[in-house]
Image: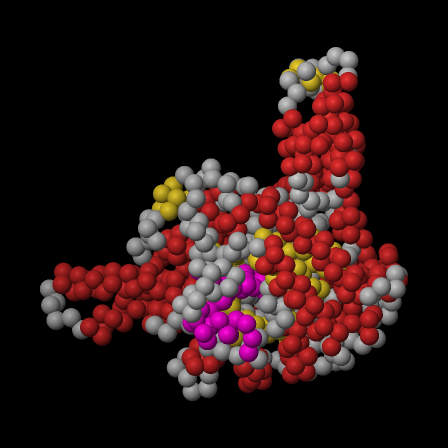
Amino acid sequence: MIIKKDGRTQGFDPQKIINAIKKSADRCCIVLTEEENNTVVNLVKSRVKQASGDVTVAEIHNMVECALDQVNPAVANSYREYRNYKKDFSVILNKVYHKKLNLSQVADRSNANADSSLITTQKAIVYNELNALLYDKFFLNDEEREAVQDGYIYIHDKGSRFDMMNCSLLDVKSILDGGFMMGNLDYINPKTLDVAFDVICDIMLNEGSSQYGGQTVCEFDKLIAPYAEKSYQKYLAEYKNILLDAGINDIDETKADKYAFEKVKRDMEQGVQAIEMRMNSCASSRGDYIFTAITFGLGTGRWETLYSSVCMKVRKEGQGKDGFKHPVLFPKLSFFYDENLHGEGKPLEWLFDEAVDCSSKSMYPDFISLTGDGYAPSIYKKYGIAISRMGCRAHLSPWFVRGGMEPADDKDYPVYVGRFNLGAITLHFPMIVAKAKEEKRDFFEVLEYYMDMVRGIHQRTFKYFAHKRAGTNPLGFCQGGFLNGHLNPEDEIGEDFLRPMTMSFGVIALNEASVLQTGKSLSEDNSFAIDVLKFVNKYINKYKKIDNILYACYGVPGETLVSTQIKQFRKKYGVIKGVSDHEYTTNSFHCCVRDEISPIEKQDIEYPMFHLCTGGNIQYCRYPIQYNFDAIKTLVRRAMKMGFYEGVNLQLDFCASCGHQFIDADACPKCGSTDIIRIERMNGYLGYSKIRGKSAFHDGKLIEFAERVSM
């Protein structure tokens, strides 16, 4: 008999040992054979038989450790790590306690979209701190934990990875069609435009709380058009009934159409405003304003083009009281560009002009090329499918309806809407270059070592998530929001469900890595960075087929990370000119923000690297010229020919004292006030770098903002 911790006794059960060692083996990506499992059990059995009387659980643990040492030392170490939890829990709780105390005195600026002065946000920060520490302790092995602490790899959103997925392209149409359940209420498909906006907004808020990355509603113009038509028919009938009730039988159809159209337009404007107001004022249960995005621009019908035009008009005019309006941050707007629709002299060039004008005044929309060079345009040109970005830049690899990673035949086609990302882990290239130099080893050998490590964590994450219940995210897994998402709440999600989802190998600071390896920045010579990205892609293409997991190469947007990495590098390798002598690293494959290069030079330099980061990328240029429409339009159109996902970057300032709008000044040129609201591009998304004297961005990022020349 085995004496349990609470004093009860229970018969010896070999299966419990097998279950425990399997979990330990999973943590270090080792699969024990049946023979090895039996060897461990038999060794423990023989020790139990030698014992005089009953045996305690602690003694059984020691026997298992000794047996594993003989069978597989790595699994034995993993098993041993898990057991030493009491001492570690004391340390973990102490860190969480101090985090909570600090929040009352020092604001947390790790996420610019989260207001740490709010109780809801403080609760989320404390919970995430605990979850991240538990993740370090119980999900990572010693080798991985050390790599994270030193800074060679960075695991994004550790506080959320136990609970939920990352970015997604939510299939809102699938949720709406036929009705759905949200919370404890049954919803029917909306009958009018105003109700449709309300319900879609509720869906976005609800789903946004169930994931930790950006959530995109794809082709919003086409999604909303059927509801606009329903309201149009309602208003036509309303107009005619008014006249008939007044005894007028001769109805002017042109006037009836104008009446109904203006009513629909009003509903459209109010619906867009409502989404903007709610997305920028309602913090989610995870403590931040939900990162939402919408794509649009391809719809050619009356209601599609009306929505596209209205949503940009509302964004350009801004929100707030009269005289003090400024653009909001969410949802992010992304405009699909098709040369055959939006090119010079084409039917929707006017809509593209509106998009450029809106972007020159609010930095949104960003522009997604569908007919230029590269992966996304090739899919659009071949299949007519436009690929939306998940949030600020994350991009899905193709998944074919019947063939999976590869098309089954010429008639097979890829699907994107309803898919998501399962997490990103970033490789810190300057650290890896420095390690290779210090140890006199080949850089690519050291890089592969860390890619193997990232791959192992991804594999465990994939298996871990497959066992979660569908009811953890009802809209996605049970109500059709995700691909094949019609599971029962008690069902396990399962590995087959996750096959179409991506897992990302993140790349960052290629500029600093290039300086360290070659002595030249990316704007001087980008050949090393190109070689690195080709190596990463070759690795990914090899192992995604072996592991049956859809890996992707992701150009990472660094917020707090850019400052964290400098501290990690300095601690390990010191201050090196051009590498760690500033307070930030450079995002993904981008040129250094301090480089004196033109927008055209920046586009040309980043072009090959952009197209190698197919799991997530963006290209943006800073425009020092004040609202020069023709210049911006020319450069955006050039970017579309190059196949870019292009962003216009300005610094937008709004005086909180008099309401005057200006750019690139620390004091209002009209009244002299320094009480400024400033919106800047963090990278693929916008944030407030100043809001009535405060900033949600950390110091490293603020220094980067101040030193920008070409970003």
Left of 634 or right of it: where is 77?
A: right
Say whether residue 386 is magenta: yes
Q: Nearer the viewer, residue 325 or 408?
A: 408
**Percent from the top left, x then y, of residue 184?**
41, 39
Q: Nearer the viewer, residue 63 or 277?
A: 63
**Percent from the top left, x then y, of residue 87?**
79, 32
Q: Quadrant of the C terminus?
A: bottom right
Q: Residue furthest front?
A: 35
Q: Nearer the viewer, residue 522 or 557?
A: 522
| Predominant SS along the magenta part | loop
**Percent from the top left, x then y, of residue 627?**
58, 80
Residue 541 visible here: yes
Say whether residue 314 is magenta: no
Rendering quarter of residue 549: bottom right
**Callout count:** 0
Q: Which residues are magenta?
A: 373-401
Q: Quadrant of the N terminus?
A: top right
